[in-house]
Amino acid sequence: MSFSPSNQALPDSLEEIETVPTVPLESAPQNGDAHGDMELHISTQPTVPPLDPAAETLPGQDIQKVIEPLSWQQVYKKVIPSVVSVVCTGNYSASSGTGVIMDDSGYIITNAHVVEDAVEISVLLHDGRTVSAQCLGLDIISDLAVLYVEAEGLIAAEFGDSELLEVGDEVVAIGDPLGVELRGTMTDGMISAINRDLQINGRTMSLIQT
């Protein structure tokens, strides 16, 4: 993935940004929609090695322990501190969307169409703080952008391994569907397909369909 260069110097902790990690995000901008539509999709399947079917019981125990998937309520409480609202103002427009804290040092993923025309970017954190953000780079085709904020106490999202996904896995989407007024909305669905190839402007992207 290529990025448009930022006019501001990057922090020492990240001298160069060449790629954005592939994460299970749904980013499907709609023409004429001033609001961002990125939502964080979280699989509820436990990312732990499968139990050995030959092991009937654990040593010293009569019943084998099984790790249960998180409930919807537990998923929400775990993830919501890492979800932020992104509010942008431009010369002749305004936009808003959802962001995900990908690193506690201040790096945030959001949609490129939310910030591409922004003159000023603000990020509303889960704890109510509003901080100024700068766009480090963006990619219009994949509709992803990376922001940076200077803030303490950020809680980064825990990213899973998309290679472990299977069709039929349950997922939830958490974000701002129609602006800051509806921030923190949660809904559920499933993995409809994996490795869906989509060509845009000569580039082929392998996507997760939900």
Image (tube, helix red, strand yellow):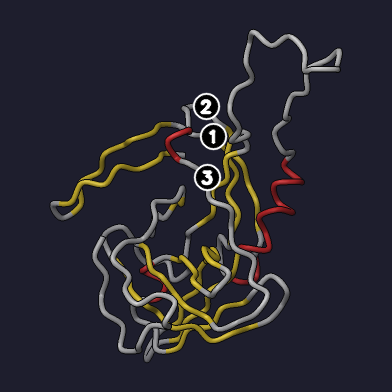
Is disc 3 in contact with disc 2, using a CB cutoff of under 8 Å?
A: no
Q: Give the residue type at disc 2.
A: Gly
Sooner in the amino-acid sequence: mark 3 or mark 2: 3
Q: Residue at x 77, y 13 (%)?
A: 57
Q: Residue at x 37, y 89 (%)?
A: 92
As drawn, is 193 to the left or to the right of 96? left
Q: Residue at x 72, y 38 (%)?
A: 70
Residue at numbered disc 1: 190
Sooner in the amino-acid sequence: mark 1 or mark 2: 2
Numbered label attached to residue 160: 3
* Nearest to viewer (mark 1 / mark 3): 3
As drawn, is 12 to the left or to the right of 48? left
- Tell me how far mark 1 sits from mark 2, CA to CA: 6 Å
Residue at the limit of the structure toward the front, as seen here: 59
Numbered label attached to residue 208: none
Is disc 1 in contact with disc 2, using a CB cutoff of under 8 Å?
A: yes
Q: Quadrant of the N terminus?
A: bottom left
On screen, residue 31 above or below 199: below
Sooner in the amino-acid sequence: mark 1 or mark 3: 3
Where residue 145 sits: x, y (%)?
A: 38, 68
On screen, residue 157 above or below 51: below
Residue at numbered disc 2: 168
Tag 2, which secondary structure? loop
Q: Residues within 10 Å of mark 1 (few under 14, many from 20)?
A: some
